[in-house]
Image (tube, rainbow, N blue to C red):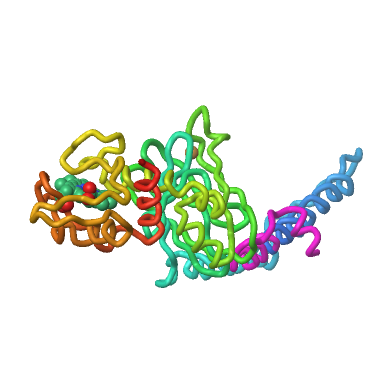
Amino acid sequence: MEWLTRLMLPAQGSVFAGEIDTIYMALFWLSVVLFLGIAIPAVYFAWRYRYKPGRVTPHVTHNTVLEIIWSVLPLLLCVGIFFWGLKGWMEYAVAPGEAMEVQVTARKWNWAFEYPDGSRDAGTLHVPVNKPVKMIMTSEDVIHDFFVPDMRVKHDIIPGRYTEVWFTPTVLGKHVVTCAEYCGKGHSDMRATLIVESQADFDNYLATGGTEWEDYKTHMADWGKIQWERKGCNSCHTLDGTRSKGPSWKGIWHKMEKMRDGSVVLVDEPYIKESENMPQAKIVDGFEPIMPTFQGLIKPHDFEGIVALIQSLQ
Ligand code: HEC
Ligand SMILES: [Cu+2]
């Protein structure tokens, strides 16, 4: 009957997909048996006891044995199904502690994902294979619903509140994420792609903040510009030579920069690194020592991008 399961249900992409399918198919077969067990006798009896002139229906009031059977059996069945479902629900209600947390923001009509390291993406959700992931979800407008059929997870997302869902993906490749709560005109377009990949690919993905690795290597300066905006360097540094609260980055690469104390420093990678981590160590002549430290806030690849950006501004 495995083929029928495959015909009726989407691919099994997570650890608990198999278990959910088992209970689903069990309920399906139970329904088939009950349906046939009721419908066939009903049709048969309608024919067998059809109207015939002169036939008198005997007067039957009740049948205690039969009534007990048809009350107690369904009761036991329902209680059994309840506890079977409850067991699964308990297992999947709470994510394991080591699960990676992804912040999901749903809005009319797209999805935004944010990873523990601050990387963000819209429309694609990357997760490493065989590791539990936990979605912490909220909505910016109306009620949406995070539904990944292959993972057998589906959960409402409510504005002003956080809801959670977790799963452990087991199948590499692309899976569909869709909204399962009618949320207006664009509801049917509200889709995203879940990409399950190896830990190494996932690490690369995070390292490049959502761009392809090859892409990133050739567009490092673009990545630097994104960091310049995201990390707030743009509030004090311009890229076009205009003086702001800090020196513009245009033309500073490999320049001999004059410091407040009269010394002269070559603007190279170590100097940029020092400016980022210990901005007070050397103060550029003519500027105030107001730059905050970014120690620990700029990942190595973000730094590479910033350096590439500064190099590109000749
Ligand atoms: C609050 C304003 C402010 C922000 C935000 C800021 N800086 Fe600065 N930065 C300055 C000032 C002022 C100077 C010059 C004085 C000094 O050397 O500390 C400076 C100097 C520098 C220098 C040396 C420039 C030169 O011409 O020698 C580098 C490199 C630099 N900042 C990088 C960054 C990076 C990277 C970021 C963002 C991650 C950043 N800054 C964010 C104010 C800021
Ligand atoms: Cu929606």
- Which residue is at 75% across, 51% downward? 59
Q: Is residue 12 magenta?
A: yes
Q: State the extent of the magenta-drawn residues as a range.
A: 1-25
Let me know if residue 60 is in the magenta part. Answer: no
Residue 144 visible within the image:
yes
Residue 75 visible, this orientation: no
Q: Tell me the quadrant of the picture where the N terminus can be found.
A: bottom right
Which residue is drawn at the image coordinates 50% and 51% (left, top)? 216
Looking at this view, is 250 or 292 the one in front?
A: 250
Tell me: residue 175, above or below residue 166.
above
Q: Which residue is drawn at 58% across and 55% down?
A: 195
Residue 83 quadrant: bottom right
Furthest-right residue in this view:
53
Q: Where is residue 42 in the image (x, y as percent from the top left)?
A: 80, 49
Of residues 89 and 235, the one nearer the viewer is 235
Residue 222 in the image: x percent, y percent?
43, 44
In this picture, residue 9 sits left or right of residue 275: right
> Magenta stretch mostly in which secondary structure?
helix
Quarter holding the C terminus is: top left
